[in-house]
Image (cartoon, rainbow, N blue to C red):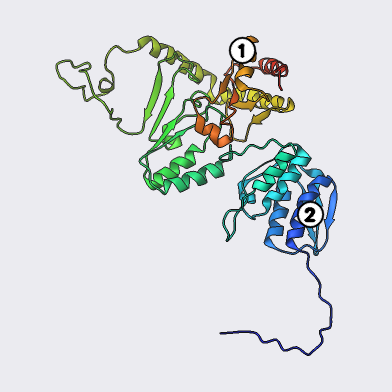
């Protein structure tokens, strides 16, 4: 066994440079956000946690640089009020930025901090203190509009085994566009069938079976494809086998359905009027161009989201979003929808048949008000909507 023997009796002389304490430096770095000025923090230790804190400040838009053992922080250039999961998980004390960002910006969005050898670090006391000071805190199950988080979570689930993976291309609640191409690639690696629900994307985004790498893509005809209700499309990458069989189809001599297409999948009276209407809708989408439709809808989405934020609404908007935006109006969502309906504006309020989506966003108890935009939406219509929203009897 190796050990160290210390023999006394000799006076110690000389000078020792005392390094700054990490646990003091980290909250001071967070506090620089409150100054809105240039700060010099002297005697900072060169440790990974200090570097992580500096990277968080840089992500928020601050200029940070070392000058020997001093850190210079310019927080006049703050541009963001959120911290991504990748930075939050680099150190267990990253939650110290929450209060400073909230005080400076009026709102903050971040994920839980990283753990250590002792396990995950709870932040209940931080949240309780902020609530006591009047902050409205919503704890969400996951981070919206974050492709990295989506892929990471799905990868962990996929390793547990799956018979099939079914994804919405675009969330019907928040308009979140999922990275279906990358998800499909992961499914191919694990040989798991990949199925896309394109209810919210067909007619507004390119839906290509081969390009997206899907085995099947299902979509209704009455939404973005502009067809009648009761119509839809199923794109098949392989041979589709019905779960149930019945009738005789076009070959009435035999008791089983024909073994050739399309007769094998068509029994009874066909919805010819519906097919005709859907065909016209498809022709319009092709004439107009999916890219043009998306561009028009997304312009109104951004205009609406920006306007709602200026009105003080909690808006769910992000980098990967299409044609739909949800918000919380500061009052009961159903009452807000009823008020707008009386003014001739149709929105959808509540949980939108998607409680898990709301659970992920932390809106399960309140729900949201959802606004959807069509191919012919205009600046005039969006501005009229915002003027009406500004008159909501909020509490």
Q: Nearer the viewer, residue 6 or 101?
A: 6
Q: Residue at x 59, y 31 (%)?
A: 363
Query: From the viewer's perspective, is 205 left or right of 229?
Result: right
Residue located beneath label 2 in the image = 28
Q: Secondary structure at mark 2?
A: helix
| Dot placed on the residue nearer the N-terminal end, 1 or 2 | 2
Residue 254, how many percent across, how many down?
Answer: 15, 19
Q: Residue at x 68, y 49 (%)?
A: 95
* Few, some or many residues within 10 Å of mark 2 (<14, 14–19, 20+): some
Q: Secondary structure at mark 1?
A: helix
* Few, some or many residues within 10 Å of mark 1 (<14, 14–19, 20+): few
Camera sees residue 118: yes
Residue 188, how many percent across, how many down?
Answer: 40, 44
Residue 293, how many percent across, how many down?
Answer: 57, 22
Residue located beneath label 1 in the image = 341
State the count of labels. Answer: 2
Which quadrant of the figure has residue 251?
Answer: top left
């Amino acid at each position: 066994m190796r050990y160290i023997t210390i023999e006394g009796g000799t006076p110690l002389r000389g000078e020792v440079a005392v390094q700054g304490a990490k646990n003091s430096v980290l909250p001071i770095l967070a506090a620089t956000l409150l100054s809105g000025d240039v700060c010099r923090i002297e005697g900072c230790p060169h440790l990974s946690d200090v570097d992580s804190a500096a990277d968080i400040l840089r992500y928020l838009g601050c200029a940070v640089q070392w000058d020997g053992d001093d850190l210079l922080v310019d927080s006049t250039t703050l541009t963001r009020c959120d911290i991504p999961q990748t930075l939050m998980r680099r150190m267990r004390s990253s939650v110290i930025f929450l209060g400073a960002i909230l005080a400076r910006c009026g709102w903050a969005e971040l994920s839980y901090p990283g753990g250590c050898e002792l396990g995950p670090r709870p932040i209940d006391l931080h949240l309780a203190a902020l609530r006591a000071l009047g902050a409205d805190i919503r704890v969400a199950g996951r981070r919206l509009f974050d492709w990295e988080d989506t892929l990471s979570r799905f990868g962990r689930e996929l390793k547990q085994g799956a018979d099939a993976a079914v994804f919405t291309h675009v969330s019907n609640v928040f308009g979140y566009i999922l990275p279906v191409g990358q998800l499909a690639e992961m499914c191919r690696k694990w040989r798991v069938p990949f199925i896309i629900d394109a209810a919210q994307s067909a007619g507004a985004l390119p839906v290509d079976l081969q390009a997206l790498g899907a085995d099947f893509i299902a979509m209704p005809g009455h939404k973005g494809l502009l067809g009648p209700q009761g119509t839809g499309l199923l794109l098949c990458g392989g041979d589709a086998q019905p779960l149930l069989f019945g009738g005789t189809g076009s070959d009435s001599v035999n008791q089983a359905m024909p073994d050739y297409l399309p007769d094998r999948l068509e029994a009874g009276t066909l919805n010819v009027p519906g097919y005709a209407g859907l065909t016209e809708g498809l022709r319009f989408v092709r004439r107009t161009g999916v890219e043009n439709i998306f561009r028009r809808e997304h312009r109104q989405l951004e205009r609406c989201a920006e306007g709602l934020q200026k009105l003080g609404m909690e808006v769910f908007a992000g980098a990967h979003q299409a044609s739909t935006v949800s918000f919380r109006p500061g009052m009961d969502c159903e009452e807000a929808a009823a008020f707008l309906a009386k003014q001739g504006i149709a929105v959808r309020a509540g949980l939108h048949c998607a409680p898990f989506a709301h659970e992920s966003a932390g809106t399960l108890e309140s729900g949201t008000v959802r606004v959807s935009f069509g191919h012919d939406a205009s600046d005039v219509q969006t501005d009229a909507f915002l003027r009406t929203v500004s008159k909501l009897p909020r509490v």
